[in-house]
């Protein structure tokens, strides 16, 4: 019997969630409560729609030419894929049998042992770090950093390739001292192959409003080119890879 899971949606020709062209599965359910979340409707683990791995594989097969020829594959994002580890593991196992690569976009807020079997069939981790300072991380996400750092340490221990993602939010995550702190920390991880410094956007604000919630960052501006350049320069100055080298 094909394993069932709950998903929010899929993107069939993604280009930003891993190498090549990607089939992106947005999983339903998330343990974080990020104030800038652009998938607010993915928090509830009982929402979304139920699908089987077989159903997803049937759809993935329609895009095989584009996925395989570009060196792409399937990305599980969210929400949080680790909340449905068994489902995601089965999906990734089947995807690999087709010769495609697998990517998991995660908050890292999990115990490593709960993700161990899933990690065995995951080729690349996209790890989104929200803030380097514990107190600020809690304000932004509702949770602390201990589990996330522990998970990152485990990924280093097993040699799992990681791309780090960090979003620049004016007034929240853009303090140069905090960026320095994160950059210095990341230098200790030789499995970090890419650091993506991304600009905040408010394109998901309408989802909060449609669900009857006030968007927490209403009025916060998108960072300008100067802020983004200065932020990236801090990480570049510490020798971190801001561009992917094949």
Image (cartoon, grey):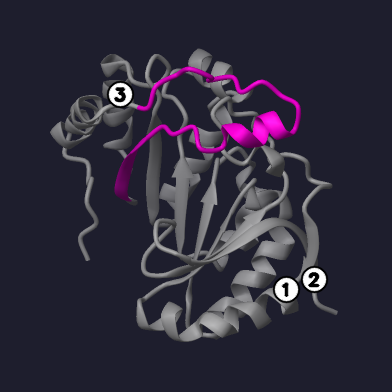
Q: Marks 1 and 2, Cα distance to the nearest angstrom?
A: 6 Å
Q: Quadrant of the C terminus?
A: bottom left
User: Crowding at label 2, few (<14), some or many (≥20) Cα neighbours within 10 Å?
Assistant: few
Q: With 233 as the anchor, is 165 left or right in this view?
A: right
In-front residue for pair 148/100 = 100
Residue 53 tag number: 1
Relative height, residue 39 to residue 81 (above, below): above
> CB of mark 1 within 8 Å of CB of mark 3?
no
Q: Marks 1 and 3, Cα distance to the nearest angstrom?
A: 40 Å
Q: Residue at horizontal 64%, vertical 47%? A: 80
Q: Which residue is mark 3?
A: 179
Relative height, residue 18 to residue 71 (above, below): above
> CB of mark 1 within 8 Å of CB of mark 2?
yes
Say what secondary structure mark 3 lies in: helix
From the top left corner, tell me how far across and down residue 240 is, in percent. Answer: 22, 41
Say what secondary structure mark 1 lies in: helix
In-front residue for pair 60/142 = 60
Per the image, is 94 magenta? no
Say what secondary structure mark 2 lies in: loop
How many discs mark residues in the rendered view?
3
Relative height, residue 85 to residue 135 (above, below): below
Q: Which residue is mark 2?
A: 3
Task: Report the magenta residues as a range.
Answer: 193-222
Dot placed on the residue nearer the N-terminal end, 3 or 2: 2
Per the image, is 212 magenta? yes
From the top left corner, tell me how far across and down residue 199 is, in percent. Answer: 36, 34
Q: Residue at horizontal 58%, vertical 84%? A: 61
């Amino acid at each position: 019997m094909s394993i069932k899971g709950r998903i929010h949606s899929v993107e069939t020709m993604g280009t930003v969630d891993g190498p090549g062209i990607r089939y992106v599965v947005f999983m339903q359910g998330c343990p974080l409560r990020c104030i800038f979340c652009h998938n607010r409707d993915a928090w509830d683990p009982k929402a979304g729609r139920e699908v089987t791995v077989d159903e997803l594989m049937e759809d993935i097969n329609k895009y095989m030419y584009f996925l395989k020829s570009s060196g792409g594959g399937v990305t599980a994002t969210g929400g949080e894929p680790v909340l449905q580890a068994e489902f995601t593991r089965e999906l990734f196992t089947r995807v690999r049998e087709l010769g495609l690569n697998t990517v998991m976009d995660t908050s890292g807020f999990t115990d490593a042992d709960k993700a161990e079997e899933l990690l065995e069939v995951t080729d690349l981790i996209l790890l989104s770090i929200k803030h380097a300072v514990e107190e600020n991380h809690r304000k932004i996400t509702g949770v602390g950093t201990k589990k996330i750092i522990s998970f990152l340490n485990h990924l280093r221990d097993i040699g799992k390739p990681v791309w780090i993602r960090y979003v620049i939010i004016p007034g929240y995550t853009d303090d140069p001292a905090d960026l320095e702190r994160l950059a210095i920390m990341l230098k200790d991880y030789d499995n970090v192959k890419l650091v993506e410094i991304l600009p905040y956007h408010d394109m998901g604000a309408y989802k909060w409003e449609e669900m009857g919630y006030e968007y927490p960052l209403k009025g916060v501006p998108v960072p300008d080119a100067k802020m983004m350049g200065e932020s990236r320069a801090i990480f570049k100055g510490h020798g971190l890879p801001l561009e992917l080298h094949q």
